[in-house]
Image (cartoon, helix red, strand yellow):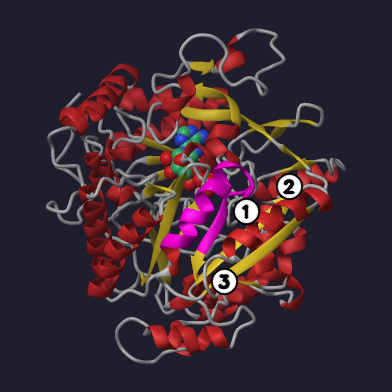
Amino acid sequence: MSFAEEAKSDVPLLPEVHSGIPEFLLEKAKGAKNWVFEGRTKPQKERQRLPVLPQGIEREAFFAALDELSGQIGAENVEVNDKPLKDGWYMEHPNTHDMMTILDEEELVASAVVYPSSTGEVQAIVRWANKHLIPIYPISIGRNLGYGGAAPRVRGSVVLDLGKRMKQIINIDPDDHTCLVEPGVSFYALYEAIKEKGYDHLWTDPPDLGGGSIIGNTLDRGVGYTPYGDHWACHSGLEVVLPTGEVFRTGMGALPGSNTWQTFPYGFGPYSDGIFSQSNYGIVTKMGMTLMANPGGHESFMYTFQKEEDLAQLIEIIRPLRISNILENVAQLRHVIQTIAVRGQPRTTYYQGSGTIPDDVVHATAATLPTGDCTWIYYGMAYGPAHIRQHKLGIIDAEFKRVRGARRVDPATLPADEYFWSRDRIASGVPDLHELRWVNWVPNGAHVAFSPVSPIRGADAERLLALARRRHDDAGFDFFPAFCVGLREMHLIIEIVFDRDDPERRAAAMACLRHMIDDAAACGYGEYRTHLVLMDQVAGTYSWNDNALMKFNEKLKDALDPNGILSPGRCGIWPKRYRGRGWEMTKESGNASEGKGVEPA
Ligand code: ADP
């Protein structure tokens, strides 16, 4: 299919396809798809390096093992990854590789993808992997874009696409305000189910885009933008298949007949949930999630701030307001260049010169937009009935206007397709599909995030921004910073947008990210989450007391996964069979993702 034909082809719909778009966003999805394919020049390439095999197993033994698995879960649920690597786009993403690849596209690829239909089948696959010493890599929906997508860290792993067949919303409890979901439930699907049941008093908490799974996003400690923004903190109860095949339930789920699995997360004894997020210790087959109560009213607001230097004063103003809950949600403080980029036009619309886009071009462009010229934009929301909102909004207005030139933009002046309204929907629990438009900034746009955490302090914000900007300037990348303000800390999310069909730009993006991670660590900042290729480096920055944390993680790995079959290398945790064989990806090791073999059986 040509790109033009592809642009016009159907977008899969919920509920026919578990990862599909809800009807109410279909027109938006069609538009987004069109734009993505308009900017695409990357040809579909012939496959290289086939067949893909995990190290440590011969070709014949591998295919015999796949046949054996086909016998257990059905041949139609076992797919060899030998077709062209199709990148698709957000709503039609691949489960074989990272569509936003920063390495050569044949580097982080699956050997096969399998589709279990139940916890029992997940257990069977895990036992099969142990028998044949084949690495497996579970994904829920596989849209973890910017952090590796569906790609496994070890080339040739068998990807367990859990979401395709395990997609049930097992329960929505309208009284407790909780739900229990399987891996294939997206934020779109949960939102639709709540609406369908007529539960207007329940809210979901979608991330910037609603196509990710509740489970995958929560396990990777993603955020949403209502007051329930910290997803990990809002979950309650897991069902987990361990790397040796046993299944158990955490918290109150361990007590037969309990009716508090989704309301009390801890149960009795050690709180084991923590070791299953950002790890490779288990496969989550069910998860409980709390749902916010509709607050009975909500109102988005937007303030603009004129100068780059306003940042420190503004952040100091934000901290006490956020901690005291006057600022109620995980709001975003964004650089105006993102408000320009999220309109979906390529950067050449605004600037045809070489190098990074000059500040005066950014400001001249911003001046023509409904937001007006500025440097920073704060997108927030007040919740509750009008008189409560007015009280909080009054305080916010007085405080924010202490910054010279601060301006409240009247939402009534903003057109319906303005990005503000997307933030408005997301912060009030309605998933959207707007955010990805800035990926069209460059042809074949891909993105990888640098996501350090800092306290909500002006000096920290300035320091992080300065070190990241310097590296962006050196590498020739436009600078896209956004602060997501949690209760007592901020995630600074800086997305590098690069042409994934250009090896030089990929390498430049990688070098820029590696420099920023090191620079930040030297000042005492660490990432909250990272891309597969950066996990070893980021894990290495958490090195206090002679890497005591990683030693502990490895002890757990060896105890829980003695054969090292589950997501080897994820979050920098390598099983014993891989250690000391050069599998880590660091600044020094270059960009090859594989080591030299594994310990023989
Ligand atoms: P999403 O479903 O939000 O698109 P992914 O499925 O890509 O997110 O999940 C992000 C990452 O989290 C995966 O790469 C995987 O390592 C891990 N993960 C996702 N789902 C599970 C699961 N059910 N059990 C264990 N790990 C998981």
Count of marks, rendered view: 3
Secondary structure under the numbered disc 2 in the rendered image? helix
Does the magenta portion include 56? no
Q: CA distance from mark 2 to mark 1?
A: 9 Å
x, y percent for residue 228: 63, 41
Secondary structure under the numbered disc 3 in the rendered image? loop
**Label 3 with label 1: CB-CB less than 8 Å:** no
The answer as to whether callout 1 falls within 8 Å of ligand 1 is no
Does the image show residue 548? yes
Tell whether 535 sits left or right of 73: left
Range drawn in magenta: 312-333
Say which quarter of the image contains residue 418. Answer: bottom right
Per the rendering, the mark at residue 210 is 1
Q: CA distance from mark 3 to mark 1?
A: 32 Å
Please report whichever mark, 2 or 1, sits nearer to the chain's N-terminal start. Answer: 2
401 over 172 or under it: above or below? below
Of the 4 image quadrants, the one containing the C terminus is top left
Q: CA distance from mark 2 to mark 3?
A: 35 Å
Please report whichever mark, 2 or 3, sits nearer to the chain's N-terminal start. Answer: 2
x, y percent for residue 375: 48, 74
The residue that disc 2 covers is 191
**Label 2 with label 1: CB-CB less than 8 Å:** yes
- Three-letter amino acid code of the residue under disc 1: Gly
Residue depicted at 38% across the width and 53% down the height: 451
Residue depicted at 40% across the width and 61% down the height: 494
- Three-letter amino acid code of the residue under disc 2: Tyr
The residue that disc 3 covers is 406
Farthest residue, direction right: 198
Does the magenta portion include 327? yes
